[in-house]
Image (cartoon, rainbow, N blue to C red):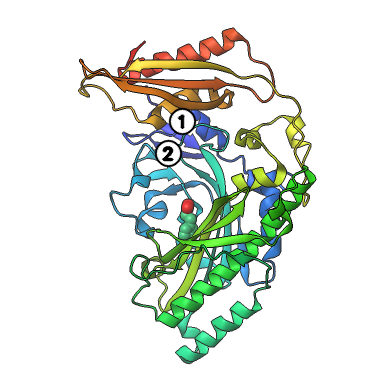
Amino acid sequence: AKPTEIKVQDQTFKTDDWTNATPRILELVGRDLHKDPNHPIGILRDLIETRFQNMGYTFYGDFKPVVSVYENFDVLGFPADHPGRSKSDTYYLNKDTLLRTHTSAHEHECFVKCPTEGYFICGDVYRRDEIDRTHYPAFHQLEGARTWSRNNFENEEQMLTKIQQDIDAIPKTEIVVSDTTPPFDPETNPKQSYMTDKETALVGQHLKRTIELLVNEVFNEAKKSAKLAGSTEEYLNEPLKVRWVEAYFPWTAPSWEIEVWWKGEWLECCGCGVVREQVLTNSGIKDTIGWAFGIGLDRIAMLLFGIPDIRLFWTLDERFKSQFKEKTISTFKPYSKYPGTTRDISFWLPESKEGFTELHENDLMEIVRETAGDLAESVKLIDEFTHPKTNKKSQCYRVNYQSMDRSLTNDEVNSLHDASRSILAETYGVHLR
Ligand code: PHE
């Protein structure tokens, strides 16, 4: 049974129908990997923040990950039916409180209190998700934003001149913007009516040059480490190639995403856009224009440090932690590999939903995570079919159990697996096969 209250970082929350944050997830809250200067996440954060020193930004890293639904969604203009709000995607403490799903949850507060024109926010964020080497329910983001207030200028022309000067002051990079960048389409990615075309164009340019500077800094380090690890691919000796593609976020317009050419693929890397007026006016700020972006740190840190599995960031094993030193990008040396062992879970879904909770794939992920924790390396749906006569639906998931620190015994794996099977049958009424 669910406890009536849960405690997170000295705060107590009453539980309700929305509560789905599990003890294992709550254990991660407060680890603050982004504040550890000797941890890959902290080292990457420092690399970026160092690049942006003395450029008019305030750096925040202390915001608590427990936020209100208002801060995470409402103030940013998320529509009521946005999938991000659902219990299958987000960890709720109760109907009003959740573990932030992005650092944008603090834009509102920062626009109000930030003493400089711009700010960076770094923090841990939480999303219910699949289980594999690159997905973990907790990860890290770095948010950036920058504004210009019309009230600080005598006229429009003066403000435009200042934004242009600010663009010119951004250090130049060798980045090549690929000609596969789709043309900007004001039909599908419209500007806001409270801004002029010229303002939108200049704010957009300042945003893009800023992100190019950031990405260039980080990926040039990633290239160095790929070369050190023995990679001889040609693109590693060429200037970084990027492209800008259209995106959608409820609180920016227009919106984009930057993609970086990496290992023969376009790697999606950072969502951004021109801040919507509503976010600023909701913060009591008028006559102001600006931009915001958010970049995920974990996947990039995996590239920089050659880390093969995202779970390693959270290990307490000294053989991992002792390998990293502040301000240094080094290549991770695996201390040993322990073999994985797979077990399948097959079941018939209940014929009628009556009396049962519908099973979402993320619910199954959560059950495995709760019983096996970081010993679950991946969970994959490997088979699904509907019986032609009875119309009953069957699913089979394969769990790979593998520890990064030690060998697992068969008995141990069997008992974890049996525990997951029982919970699945009891909670969701499935018929195990
Ligand atoms: N918060 C967005 C995400 O999680 C990224 C973003 C930040 C987009 C700021 C636009 C502006 O993907």
Point out which mark residue 389 bears: none
Name the amino acid, label 2.
Tyr
Point out which mark residue 91 bears: 2
Question: Going from the N terminus, do you reach mark 2 or mark 1 first?
Answer: 1
Label 2 residue SS = loop
Up the image or down, 124 lies above or below 88; here it is: below
Q: Which corner quadrant holds the N terminus? A: top left
Q: Residues within 10 Å of mark 1 (few under 14, many from 20)?
A: some
Q: Whole-percent x and y of residue 421?
A: 42, 15
Q: Residues within 10 Å of mark 2 (few under 14, many from 20)?
A: many
On the image, numbered disc 1 is attached to which residue? 22
**Residue 425 vs residue 14, the one in the foreground:** 425
Name the amino acid, label 1.
Thr
User: Can residue 107 be seen in the rendering of this structure?
Assistant: no
Up the image or down, 79 lies above or below 319; here it is: below
Task: Name the quadrant containing residue 238.
Answer: bottom right
Task: Name the quadrant containing residue 367.
Answer: top left
Report if the CB atoms under discs 2 and 1 are less than 8 Å apart.
yes
**Residue 333 vs residue 357, the one in the foreground:** 333
Up the image or down, 143 lies above or below 339; here it is: below
Answer with left or right where residue 117 lies relative to residue 363.
right
Q: Which corner quadrant holds the C terminus? A: top left
**Residue 359 vs residue 269, the one in the foreground:** 269
- Residue depicted at 73% across the width and 33% down the height: 320
- Residue depicted at 40% across the width and 49% down the height: 68
Q: Whole-percent x and y of residue 76?
A: 39, 59
Task: Name the quadrant containing residue 91.
Answer: top left
Q: Is mark 1 within 8 Å of ligand 1?
A: no
- Residue depicted at 51% across the width and 86% down the height: 159
Q: Is mark 2 within 8 Å of ligand 1?
A: no
